[in-house]
Structures are given as C-alpha cells and as structure tokens.
C-alpha cells in the first residue's frame, strides 16, 4: 500500500481543515488538506510527463515550507523515491548520498541549484526542476497547474522504497536509512499512538520529518518563520510571537531548542499555557531541561523521547513519572533514565562486543532475552517501525540481524534495564572508557556535571590514557567543586570550552570526532 493513500483518505475526513499554516517566509499562508492533495496531484502529473517512473530517485532540496510537503507527497503518489541530503555537510557527503541510489531528477529552489556548481554528482542528474526561479538547465514546476486526467496513486508493495535519509554522523560517517512505504505506515501507527496525535490539534513544527505523521492524523502543522536547520540558534522571542499568535496545542523539538526557549520564558515571565503536550528528543534529555519546561508550562504533558534515525521512538519518559529515587540515581552516576520502551518495541540489552570488535549480533543474543536487569550492554531493538537491513550495504549488515522474522537493529548505545523494565542510557558504546581503574561511561559523569547550572554541556572522553571531562560554559567554573561531585569517576583533567561541537541536525548530540580533534590540538 502506498502511504499516499492514507493522506488521500484524510482529505475525505478533513478536506477543508487547515493542513499547513506556512509562516516560513512571513506570508501567513494556509493550505487545506484538499488543497494540499490537489497541488500534489498536479506536481505528480508534471513529474510523470517528464518521464519519471516508479522507483526513480529524486534529490529534494527545498526549504521547510508548504511546497516541500506538496513535493514530497507528489513523489510518494508517483512511487518515486525522495532522497534527502544535507548539502552543508560538503561535496563528499553529496557524492556519497547520490551513489547510494543514483537519482534521475533533482528538485530544488533556485538557491539549491547553486550546489550543482560544486557537486559533479548533482550535475550528472538527467532531469532538473526549479520550484521558484527560472534556472538554466532546469524546468520550472507549476504548483497551480491542474492535474488534468492523471490522478492515480501508484500501487507500491510494503517493502517498496519511499525515501532515503541519512543519519547525523555525529559519531562518524553518516549512513543511509532507506524507508519503505510499509515502514512509514508502521511508523505512522506507532507515532499516532505514542505521541497521541489527535485530529484538529495544531503542532508547532521544528522537526520537519514528523509533518507526514501530522498530515496522516489530521493534525495541523504550523511552520514558523525561523531557521529550522539550526534549532539551537533559533531566537526564542521569534518563536514565542508565533506561539502567542496561533496558540498551538503541541510541540516536538530538540533539547537544544527547548533549553534556550524555556530559559527565555523563565527570565521574561512568559508562561506557555497553550501547550497540552511537549515532546523532546534527538539527543540526551537531562532532568534539568524537563524541570525547566515544567516550570514554564506546568499544565503540559512533558515527554522525553529516545530513538534513532533507524527506530523512532524506542522509549518514552513522562516527566510526571520520574521519582526522587530516580533523580538520586542519576546524581550518583547511574546514567540517564530514558523511560519505558514503547509498546511496539522489542528491546534487549546484549554484550557490548556485538558489532564493536568484528563480532556481529547473533540470533542467540536476542533470543535469550538479553542481559539481566542492572547489567550494562548494548541496546538492540526490533519492531514494526525499526529500519530493516539493507542487504546491499556491508556496514548495515554489521549492525542488523534478522532473527525470528524480526529485523534487529544495534543502536550503538550502551544502557541497561532496571527492575521495573525501564531503560537507562550510559552513552555511546564507542565512548566507553576502559582502563586500569575500571569502566566508565560518558552519561555516568555528564548527568552529574550538568547539575551545575553554569555547565551548559559536558562530555567525557579518553585522551592519552587520561580521563578528560570537557565542560561548555560561558562563565567561570569552580573546577574543584565539579571534581568533588565526581569523586567516584576518577576524572584526571577538566577542560573548559566556550563551545562543545554538536551534530548539525538537532544541535544536541556531542560531535565526538570534532571534539577529539579539538582536544588533540590542545
């Protein structure tokens, strides 16, 4: 089943209701569900007339806007494959992305076509389309052109690819995640339940990929006039103006965005009384952020989400369920509480050596039920919304296993389950420090360091056989006071930086390769 059928069914139920409120350019445009389908059908007809057929890949470089979703739905309707790349990652990244599934077409705004000058891979693409300006060598797509007689939604099997996106690469080279129509349908069902998507509500969009789920559930998506490509740098006052004007019911955002936003609202005594639900994920979610959000939005249900590009969501933590004993455990170096695994997820803790030292995950590792409660290992997951293995990618094969007819994914994260079945995270497996003093995990230390209000970020790594704690702070830090809190961790060196490098997508995960380079340079 083509997931576009789900969107078409929504039109029959919510045709005249607003699907997208687009303020991305300050134009305050409203697109109804019926208008969205009509425009997508027209664009799909133009792509078909240009010779594109099911299975062809299209590089899509369009700013977050109503047009982006018109294009995406047109691609889905046509049985084409949307290829999402991050051109800011550089030419090598673009070349690798285009090699995964060589594209037949390139669609982008006028400015996006400038990347053709630096990328041979983009120049080699046979068909090129512009969405706004007249561009040499590109056809202009008309978003108002009627679909004439062609309104068909291409039939697609459940394993037929719908889109390809790439991981953030914050711990190494980014990897492709091929998402089929069946995967998107399964993820939609999980997200609708886990995130309680309710028709008629309005969602303030900061994570663009979740708009597809909003559309399928009948939720209106408000696209703010901010740069969503840099969530940690969004001016809080700009976002607050839109919130006070439109009063959305829900928001899902990265910790970096919400930290700045909650701090701003607290300093200026601006409560967030319109939100019913606040979800945050895309990086570690520490207790102080949840406390800050509760202080400015006391009536909202606040949920921390743990997941990955290959499996979203994996576990959820409702703020109201955090006990004082949980806070004490995090303060004592037990790691970071991530909450209960989603009901659709099968989660195991297996020996960390799986996939890290040339040993792949085996069926016995998952069929045995995993390691007992309290024993740390690697988090592996299976479920209907877990990305299956790509048999053509040797690296992907190393992190996946099909056991008992379920594709299991190795997250690369270390953690353990407690006696209540809740997941506790310890950090990346590759970030584990093992030396003569024993084993140390990053989140054991970072949870403690972040209790200091002057510490914005913290990261732990090994450098020249020394345990190094790196702290990001714009104000002076009493390192001896920090060290006294970390007495059990045996930290050798505390280094203060004005800025710790983070991933480009969510601005919330530590970019460890970049941080190691900074430490090596001294």
Image: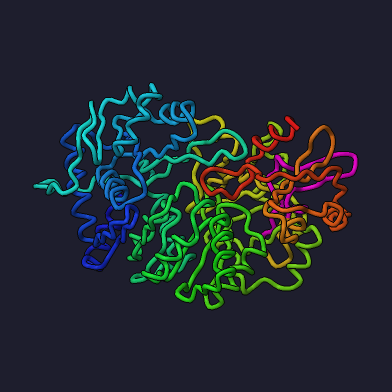
Determine whether 250 is above or below 423 in the image: below
Residue 173 shows in this picture: yes
Using residue 35 as the reference point, say whether residue 25 is left or right of it: right
Is 522 one of the magenta-colored residues?
A: no
Q: Position of residue 215 (x, y in %)?
A: 33, 60
Any part of residue 406 in sight? no
Q: Is residue 437 magenta?
A: yes
In the rendered view, would you say 513 is above or below 64? above
Q: Which residues are magenta?
A: 422-446
Q: Position of residue 55 (x, y in %)?
A: 31, 36
- Residue toward you, 85 or 3: 85
Q: Position of residue 103 (x, y in %)?
A: 34, 30
How many numbered tags mark residues here? 0
Residue in view at x 31 percent, y 38 percent: 108
Residue located 85% across and 51% down the image: 489
Left or right side of 28 for 145: left
Toward the viewer: 102 or 171?
Answer: 171
Looking at the image, residue 215 sits to the left or right of residue 416; the answer is left
Q: What residue lies at 52% left-to-right and 60% top-to-bottom?
A: 344
Q: Which one is nearer the viewer's eye here, 182 or 57?
A: 57
Please give the name of the residue rendered at 23% of the width and 30% of the height, measured from the top-left corner: 138
Of all residues shown, which one is farthest toward the left? 148
Q: Quadrant of the C terminus?
A: top right
């Amino acid at each position: 089943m083509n997931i576009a059928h789900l969107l078409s069914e929504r039109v029959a139920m919510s045709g005249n209701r607003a699907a997208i409120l687009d303020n991305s350019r300050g134009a305050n445009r409203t697109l109804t569900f019926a208008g969205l389908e009509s425009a997508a059908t027209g664009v799909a007809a133009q792509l078909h007339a240009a010779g594109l057929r099911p299975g062809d890949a299209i590089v899509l470089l369009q700013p977050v806007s109503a047009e982006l979703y018109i294009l995406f739905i047109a691609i889905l309707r046509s049985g084409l494959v949307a290829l999402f790349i991050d051109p800011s990652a550089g030419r090598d990244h673009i070349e690798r992305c285009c090699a995964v599934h060589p594209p037949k077409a390139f669609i982008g705004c006028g400015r996006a076509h400038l990347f053709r000058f630096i990328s041979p891979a983009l120049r080699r693409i046979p068909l090129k389309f512009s969405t706004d300006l007249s561009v040499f060598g590109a056809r202009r797509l008309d978003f108002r052109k009627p679909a004439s007689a062609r309104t068909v939604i291409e039939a697609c099997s459940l394993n037929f690819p719908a889109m390809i996106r790439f991981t953030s690469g914050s711990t190494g080279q980014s990897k492709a995640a091929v998402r089929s129509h069946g995967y998107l349908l399964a993820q939609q069902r999980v997200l609708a339940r886990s995130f309680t998507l309710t028709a008629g509500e309005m969602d303030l969009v900061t994570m663009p990929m979740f708009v597809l789920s909003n559309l399928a559930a009948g939720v209106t998506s408000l696209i703010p006039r901010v740069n969503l490509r840099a969530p940690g740098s969004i001016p809080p006052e700009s976002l607050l103006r839109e919130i006070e004007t439109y009063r959305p019911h829900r928001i899902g955002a990265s910790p970096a965005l919400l930290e700045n936003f909650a701090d701003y609202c607290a300093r200026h005594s601006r409560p967030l009384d319109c939100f019913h639900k606040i979800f945050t994920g895309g990086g570690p979610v520490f207790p102080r952020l949840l406390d800050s959000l509760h202080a400015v939005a006391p009536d909202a249900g606040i949920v921390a989400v743990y997941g990955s590009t290959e499996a979203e969501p994996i576990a959820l933590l409702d703020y109201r369920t955090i006990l004082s004993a949980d806070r004490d455990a995090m303060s004592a170096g037990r790691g970071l509480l991530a909450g209960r695994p989603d009901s659709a997820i099968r989660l195991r803790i297996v020996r960390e050596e799986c996939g890290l030292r040339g040993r792949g995950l085996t069926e016995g590792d998952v069929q045995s039920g995993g390691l007992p409660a309290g024993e740390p290992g690697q988090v592996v997951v299976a479920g209907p919304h877990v990305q299956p293995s790509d048999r053509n990618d040797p690296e992907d094969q190393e992190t996946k296993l099909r056991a008992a007819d379920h594709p299991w994914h190795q997250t690369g994260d270390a953690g353990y389950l407690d006696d209540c079945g809740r997941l506790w995270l310890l950090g990346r497996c590759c970030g584990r420090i093992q030396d003569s003093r024993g084993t140390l995990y990053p989140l054991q230390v970072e949870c403690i360091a972040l209790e200091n209000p002057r510490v914005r970020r913290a990261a732990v790594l090994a450098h020249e056989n020394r345990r190094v704690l790196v702290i990001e702070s714009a104000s002076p830090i009493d390192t001896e006071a920090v060290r006294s809190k970390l007495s059990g961790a045996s930290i050798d060196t505390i280094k203060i930086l004005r800025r710790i490098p983070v991933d480009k997508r969510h601005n919330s995960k530590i970019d460890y390769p970049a941080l190691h380079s900074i430490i090596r340079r001294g």
